[in-house]
Image (spheres, rainbow, N blue to C red):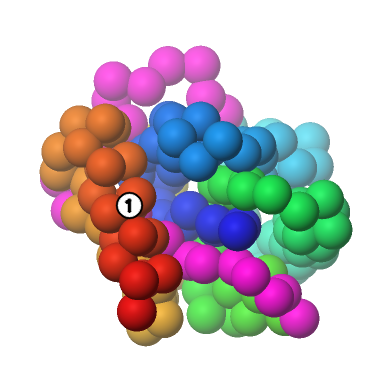
Amino acid sequence: MLIILMGVAGSGKSTVGRMLARALGGDFHDADDLHPPANRDKMRRGIPLTDDDRRPWLVSVRALIDRCENAGGNAVVACSALKEAYRATLLAGAKDVLLVYLKGSPELIVQRLAARHGHFFDPALLRSQFDALEEPHDAIVIDIAGTSAQIVAAITLALRLRHAN
């Protein structure tokens, strides 16, 4: 099973994703690692990415998803996937991929970003992320108000319930 963990910056995709991958006995991949240097530079300077900026990145993330599917086993990919069109690109032709949306209030996300250090994302861009966000209709939605361990537990429970039906 492949899980795409989506949400705005600061929602916990990387932290929760690593923990979830361990819990599932799978691999973790952070789509942020696939951003070209120009994208990282823009975000570092507080300049929102355009759809044109994101297009090659999404192609790279889609290739990663293909590699994960071909490898088999469990994997978690952390990727903002803010717009429906981005998710359509990422999921096109995918077989066993679940979307998990880490949802939190802007106030909570601002607090988390303030505590984060060493990431290229300028917290001033958060408003642009919420503006671009098109909440998914076909995802497991997880409230991120709890601890990372509580969030992972909620995701694993949701996965068990989904597979039980």
Q: In the image, residue 112 lies at what x, y percent?
A: 26, 31
- Between 115 and 100, the one lying in front of the other is 100
The residue wearing badge 1 is 155
Task: Determine the residue located farthest toward the front in the rendered image.
Answer: 164
Q: In the image, residue 34 lies at what x, y percent?
A: 75, 42
Location of the C terminus (image quadrant): bottom left
> To which quarter of the image does residue 30 belong?
top right
Location of the N terminus (image quadrant): bottom right
Q: Residue at x 46, y 57 (%)?
A: 6
Q: Residue at x 70, y 36 (%)?
A: 33
Q: Is residue 58 visible?
A: yes
Task: Determine the residue located farthest toward the top in the rendered image.
Answer: 118
> To which quarter of the image does residue 96 belong?
bottom right
In this rendering, position of residue 157 left or right of residue 52: left
Q: Residue at x 69, y 75 (%)?
A: 95
In this rendering, position of residue 41 left or right of residue 22: right
Q: How many marks?
A: 1
Q: Which residues are magenta?
A: 93-120
